Amino acid sequence: MGKVAVVYWSGTGNTEEMAKAVLEGAKKGGAEAELFTVSDFGADKMADYNGFLFGCPAMGDEVLEEDEFEPFFTEAEKKLSGVPVGLFGSYGWGSGAWMEAWAERTKAAGAKLVSDGVIVENAPDDDGVKACEELGEAVAKAL
């Protein structure tokens, strides 16, 4: 059984809700999965996991959260080559450009990106929760 870390940042609770759904999907997919806020998970812990689900909402001009998540992800990128990864996050404006840029960045790091990312506007509805669970399950099966 593979081990997955779900690592997220959430300002309003929307991405946290998504993270919990992703975690359940990963477990349903057969992975041993653990949930972490980005402040509780450093890139130094990545060697203990076989796959990752990263969650961050769109911030500012459709960018990753800059104080905690961006510095973490900059370090994490160096350790993603060949690793299954799923991305998710919420937004309140824009068109999802932050997710497109994040997905391209993750692919450029050599990760095995499982999908182009799951995004929801504001809080996830039933369809959003289902999409998150499916993303978690897909990463678990990609291990």
Image (cartoon, rainbow, N blue to C red):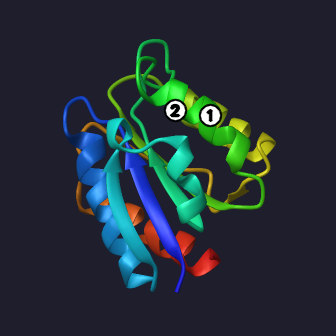
- Tell me the quarter of the picture where residue 130 sits: bottom left
Q: Is residue 128 visible?
A: no
- Viewer-side residue, 128 vs 11: 11
Q: Percent from the top left, x then y, of residue 46?
A: 56, 54
Q: Which residue is mark 1?
A: 75
The C terminus - image quarter: bottom right
- Viewer-side residue, 117 vs 78: 78
Residue drawn at the location 46% of the way across and 18% of the way down = 66
Q: Secondary structure at mark 2?
A: helix
Cβ atoms at labels 2 and 1 below 8 Å apart: yes
The answer to whether 40 appears left or right of 99 in the picture is left
- Above or below, 67 against 58 in this view is above
Residue drawn at the location 31% of the way across and 53% of the way down = 18
Q: Percent from the top left, x then y, of residue 81?
A: 77, 53
Q: Secondary structure at mark 1?
A: helix
Q: Amino acid at mark 1?
A: Glu
Q: Residue furthest left?
A: 13
Q: Amino acid at mark 2?
A: Phe
Q: Which residue is mark 2?
A: 72
Residue drawn at the location 45% of the way across and 68% of the way down = 136
Give the Cα distance between marks 2 and 1: 5 Å
